[in-house]
Image (cartoon, grey):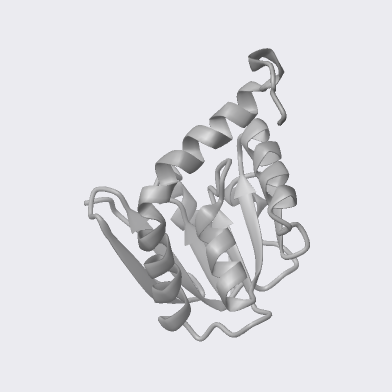
Amino acid sequence: MCYYAVESVTEEIMEIYSVIRSIFAYIPNYLQLAKTEYQGSPLKPGDNVLFLGSGPLPISLIILCRLYGLRGVGIEQEPDRAELSRIVLQKLGCSDQIRIIEGNQYTLPMIEKFELIMVAAQAEPKKAIFDHLADVLQFCFYLALQEQHLREHCLLMIAAGQILRGYKMQ
């Protein structure tokens, strides 16, 4: 039997544990969200998806990529959260399928073309994010947006930023 001293457990591990514990109750929601995103867009195995505001535990990205054979990029602006996310992905064996980079909406455009772009509910300010996406992304893509205040999921087909311009929060 193995015993660990409380002092040897880092704050990061405790944060991951706390987040994972709270997420387990919502796993069915994440699975349904991934199914909606996959079936509501023309995604196929091997396609690229991007999650803007991926956080320390990019569970949406992990589930979507693992279940449907997609390749993912998470963009997180907080360096400590991005690093924690990389550690989680490595421990789960997802590092070859999903990569996390530090940045924000201004990290875009990137070399890759993304068939689906997900914007985290907590990613702010939405107007600046969508205005920038409308300016720089010159190809068609699907945008997945989950708004906490609406408690629903929205999947939109975007043609070179047409719908994004002038986005307003309700």
Task: Report the residue at 72% width, 70% height from top.
Answer: 112
Task: Report the residue at 75% width, 57% height from top.
Answer: 95
Nearer to the camera, 114 or 10: 10
Apparent side of residue 128 relative to residue 58 in the rendered image (left or right) = left
Residue 125 in view, yes or no? no
Total marks placed: 0
When the figure is inspected, residue 133 is found, relative to residue 113, above or below; the finding is above
Q: Quadrant of residue 80?
A: top right
The extreme right residue here reads 96
The extreme top residue here reads 7
**Residue 69, position in %: x, y?**
64, 76
Task: Report the residue at 71% width, 38% height from top.
Answer: 83
Residue 128 in view, yes or no? yes
Task: Report the residue at 45% width, 45% height from top.
Answer: 123
Nearer to the camera, 25 or 73: 25
Nearer to the camera, 12 or 130: 12
When the figure is inspected, residue 161 is found, relative to residue 14, above or below; the finding is below
**Residue 41, position in %: x, y?**
46, 82
When the figure is inspected, residue 168 is found, relative to residue 103, above or below; the finding is below
**Residue 22, position in %: x, y?**
41, 40
Nearer to the camera, 100 or 141: 100
Quadrant (top left, top right, bottom left, bottom right) of the N terminus: top right
